[in-house]
Image (cartoon, rainbow, N blue to C red):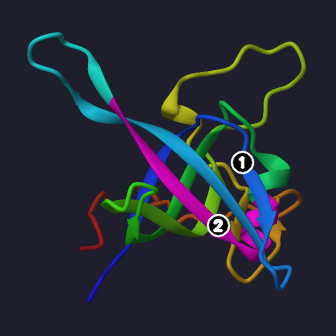
Amino acid sequence: MLNHIVIMGRLTRDPELRYTQSQTPVASFTLAVDRDFANRDSGERQTDFIDCVAWRQTAEFVSKYFQKGSMAVVSGRLQIRDWTDREGGKRRSAEIVVDNVYFGESKRRDGEPRSDSHSSYGGSYSSNSYGGSDSGRGAAPAPSAFAELDDGDGELPF
């Protein structure tokens, strides 16, 4: 079976970092994710608020580098939990158990306005459940999958 989800949105509040009794870090946060389509009547896009939970090094990474308003790309698995509220009612909630977190926008320089454009998607910063973060600085650019053709005889090689 496959249970994999990828979402992109803005944090609605600063991540909440806590520790279990065995001192395992866990961070909780909520992403505001706009739907791709607009409401027929009002013409406005609706927003979904999706709860996320990150563990271990990923939790520490989120807590250290993200705050309210940060654009984040999250991948992980959807988890449904059944629980009982204070009045004894049965409740159900969905959340994403985070495997990887990526910056959804490039880092701003002091004085630059925040860009709401999605064109900056795919920043080179990431964290995964195996720990650590990769800034991507100083790395050689990835080789291109395309090769230059010379105009020798004017025929394509396929």
**Dot 1 alpha-carbon crowd within 10 angstroms: few under 14, some 14 to 19, many 20 or more:** many
Residue 15: give its label: 1
Q: Nearer the viewer, residue 34 or 146?
A: 34
Give how far across and how far down residue 24 sits, in percent.
80, 79
**Does residue 30 appear left or right of residue 40 in this picture?**
right
Relative image position of residue 28 (x, y in whole percent): 64, 56
Q: CA distance from mark 2 to mark 1?
A: 10 Å
| Secondary structure beneath label 1 | loop
Callout 2: SS = strand
Magenta span has 58?
Answer: yes
Give the magenta part as a residue range. 47-61
Amino acid type, mark 2: Ala
| Quadrant in the picture for residue 36 | top left
What is the tally of numbered marks visible in this picture? 2
Q: Nearer the viewer, residue 138 or 152?
A: 138
Q: Which mark is on residue 54?
A: 2
Question: Vertically, is 62 above or below 132?
Answer: above
**Image quadrant for the N terminus?**
bottom left
Image quadrant in which the C terminus is located: bottom left
Name the kind of residue labelled 1 in the image: Pro
Dots 2, 1 in contact, CB < 8 A: yes
Q: Nearer the viewer, residue 72 or 138?
A: 72
Query: Which percent across, then down, holds residue 30?
Result: 55, 45
Taking the spot 50% from the left edge, 33% from the top edge, the residue there is 118
Magenta region includes residue 5: no
